[in-house]
Amino acid sequence: MICLDNKDLDNILRGAQILGCGGGGEIEWGKGLIECAIKKGKSFKLLSINDKNEDREDPLICIIGAVGGGVSDEIKRKTAPILRNMSAEDRMEKPILRAVEELAAYKGQDPGGFIPTEIGAGNMAVTMFAAAMQDKFVLDGDCCGRAKPMISISTTGIAGIPQTPLACINALGDVMILKDARNDIHAEDICRSFAVVSGGTCYCARCMQKLSRYVNAMIPGSFTRCLKLGNAMSKARESADNPASALLEVEKDAKILFRGEIISHEKKYAGGFITGMLKLKGNREYKGHNYDVWFKNEFLAGFLDARMNYKCPDLICVINEDEYRGVSNWDDFDEETGAPVTVAGIPSHPIWKTEKGLEIFSYERLRR
């Protein structure tokens, strides 16, 4: 068990913003949650799966994370006036903690620790916030190895851990306990619908299981991975080194897919998702070429001169070279136009290349 200091926390979010593949929650509200817990004097404890000894207790682990994305103008007209006047505490902090409390009350058991649903600057911060505020630990891992557009895309599904029972809470005061669902996909549909009527975001606590069950239901080392990448990016920025080189130094299996600049970031907000295409024009060795990245919350497929050359479950990371950060699909288009970027591909964890893994997470499935 180690305690993370402020520099560690900052670099974890920096690394998670890149490995989140354009999604995984916004870094700004992630930083806000971390700052809130720090101001309250809370500490951030990280437990490696290797620290679990046979003679130690086998605590319950719970996933806690934000669910949602884009909503229609009609939904915004109903919810925006309410959400706009709320404090960060009422909009995020209280619903996050209440989601955990409601699931614990339903199960009659409190979790001893938490694990994020995915790698992402927002959802990793949600998990760290919940753990810190309840004086518990975060498990050094996650349930995807990158960010993903749906909660049904989860290593817990491969391991046979169902999403239900789960608790969903929003800032409007609505509380939903989903006792059971036909399958994980149906549970996702229900939670996504709840997020839509919530104005785009809700907070979901789920998959409460013993730590021993999570050994084969998670991807280990996610926080230390993000910390290492974030630290490398921070050092590269200080010395004005190339951010792509810093990525390749840490992520040994990564490869450069494209270098260029952003010419458009086309987006559509609907159904609890933000979908569209990030369009780039090449420079340096890619001059005269174009690259398009299709996203559904996260970057999921890349096309070099209109021909696909990379796709999920592998990671597509787009790095803003001037700012040494991951490009997010929630970034402001006007500020991003013309920004120099590197597109990198990183192989996913091998669990996603199994037959069952590809049934859950593949480009072909997401495009149906």
Image (cartoon, rainbow, N blue to C red):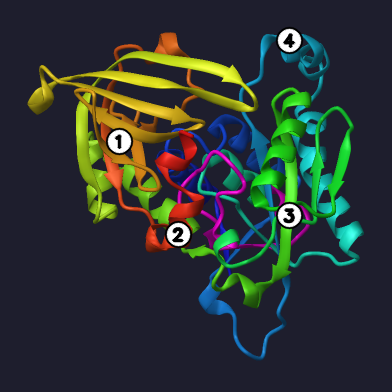
In magenta, the rendered stretch is: 129-156
91 left or right, relative to 343: right
Name the residue nearer the viewer: 302 or 189: 189
* Marks 2 and 4, the one that precedes in the sequence: 4
* Marks 3 and 2, the one that precedes in the sequence: 3
* Marks 1 and 4, the one that precedes in the sequence: 4
Q: Amino acid at mark 2?
A: Thr
The residue where tag 3 is placed is 206
Residue 74: numbered disc: 4
Outermost bottom residue? 55
Q: Nearer the viewer, mark 1 or mark 4?
A: 4
Q: How many marks?
A: 4
Callout 1 crowding tier (Cα within 10 Å): few <14, some 14–19, many ≥20: some
The residue where tag 2 is placed is 224
Q: CA distance from mark 1 to mark 4?
A: 42 Å
Name the residue nearer the viewer: 170 or 236: 170
Q: Amino acid at mark 3?
A: Arg
Determine whether 356 is above or below 24 in the image.
below
Callout 4 crowding tier (Cα within 10 Å): few <14, some 14–19, many ≥20: few
Helix, strand or loop under label 1: helix
**Which residue occupies 69% across, 60% down?**
162
Q: Position of residue 152 (x, y in %)?
A: 61, 48
Is 131 part of what is drawn in magenta? yes
Q: Nearer the viewer, mark 2 or mark 4?
A: 4
